Image: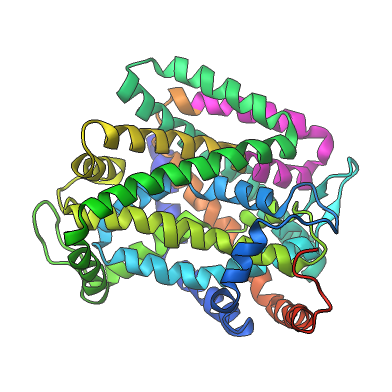
Amino acid sequence: MESLGRFFSDLNGMLWGPWLLVLLVGTGIWLTIQLKGIQFRLLPYALRLTFARERAGEGDVSHFGALMIALAATIGSGNIAGVATAITLGGPGAVVWMWVAALFGMATKYAEGFLAVRYRQVNHKGEISGGPMYYIETGLGWKWLGICFAMCGAVAAFGIGNMVQANTSTLALVEVFSISKETVGVVLAVFTGLVILGGIKRIAEVVSFFVPFMVLLYFAGSLAIIIGHASELPAGLALLFKDALSGSAASGGFAGATLAQAIRFGVERGLFSNESGLGSAPIAAAAAKTNQPAKQALVSMTGTFLDTIIVCSLTGLVLSTTGVWDSGKTGVELTLQAFNAGLPGEWGQWIVTLGVVTFAFSTILGWCYYGEKCFEYLAGERFILIYRIAWISFVYIGAVRELAFVWDFSGAMNALMAVPNLIALLALSRLVGRETKEFETGVLKGTIHRFD
């Protein structure tokens, strides 16, 4: 087991090297050029469209439901622990580079959503199926590459989307309530089963409640801390931007970070958080009820904005304004320390714990849908029940077992998902740009209604 852990650790480090980060950000920059900065020009319209009721077109869920499934999978423990880890490794300036990666990543997320809807298919049950495997096969004609993506997606889901999330939430609940891992594992597996056995519509219903609730709760707690430390806010913001351009000198329990480290860990953790370019979110986007690929694509890109520009920024500002970022702690412990320092009594502990648990549970639901759609592409929809039963079982396993190598294994599989997806995005970028221009021209001329 130790040698297996070293293998996946080395593989993960090799795959997530500078070359992949450059490819991810570079794809976002290229798509931003192709789409003429659509994430800046049409963001207000995209946010309004998110809550519009679509009456025309095929689909299983609403724009909002599809976005909530995608956000359920992306807004996870990484928004709480991942930002803290980025600051620990790269200094406070890493947060600014997370923003940079997210702004370009919004164009990537738009293109993913566009292609997912344009090339989606209807399976034998009358349900929508889509995602990178379909636009790779149909758009490029490379079924073998679509199979590679689907294999990695179906397997990776059990790691980062299942066992890691179950383990994270279990550790938080055991610490606070002093209950056994087995008890948490059984309860978590039962609740997961009750949701996912109902299919995408039940998943959409549950996460449409959970995601807004958990984001608003975390937003309220973070905002209370920032307001309570309003006098430190200018200095906290200045610290972020200063370190983003110069790196951090050693202080307190912080060992210091170079500019290169700030860029690397900011970009890396930002992309891990919002999953732009990974190829997971378009699987949910394909299920949206819409008559225009561009509409759901616009809604999809708001996911990166909400995940990184809003939620991750809150964590970064809390850490910088409370001044605990250089205490020597890392991950969720650092975020917990900041919330305990910023809120009275045990409010900080409760908000972080509840945030970790709800974020993790929603991620389990969202990634189950991603994984089963990849599995459906490989084996057909007849075997989906087997995948769901296996998924429930692995929730329990993740809750009660140590996960020494799962993080590295999941990271390697995610990288192997990203590469074929990015190839397809670049190869089909001109098509996305051309048809988006046609859509915008139609909207401006009034031939396409904004809210059908």
Work out which residue is located at the far left of the displayed protein and give it: 252
Residue nearest the observer in this picture, 187 or 182: 187
In the figure, residue 169 lies in which quadrant? top left
- Residue 35 is situated, as x and y percent measured from the top left of the image, at 63, 81
- Residue 242 is situated, as x and y percent measured from the top left of the image, at 21, 74
- Tell me if I can see residue 420 in this picture: no
- Residue 194 is situated, as x and y percent measured from the top left of the image, at 66, 24
Position of the N terminus, as image quadrant, is: top left
Q: Along the horizontal axis of the image, is 48 left or right of 179?
A: right
Question: What residue is shown at x 65% (from left), y 58% (from top)?
Answer: 50
- Residue 394 is situated, as x and y percent measured from the top left of the image, at 56, 28
Question: What residue is shown at x 79% (from left), y 69% (from top)?
Answer: 139
Position of the C terminus, as image quadrant, is: bottom right
In the figure, residue 342 lies in which quadrant? top left
- Tell me if I can see residue 225 in this picture: yes
Range of residues picked out in magenta: 368-397
Predominant secondary structure, magenta span: helix
User: With respect to residue 399, does 332 lie above or below?
Assistant: below
In the rendered image, residue 164 lying in the magenta stretch gets the answer no
Q: Along the horizontal axis of the image, is 235 left or right of 272?
A: left
In the rendered image, residue 374 lying in the magenta stretch gets the answer yes
User: With respect to residue 98, does 434 lie above or below?
Assistant: below
Question: What residue is shown at x 84% (from left), y 45% (from top)?
Answer: 127
In the figure, residue 364 lies in which quadrant? top right
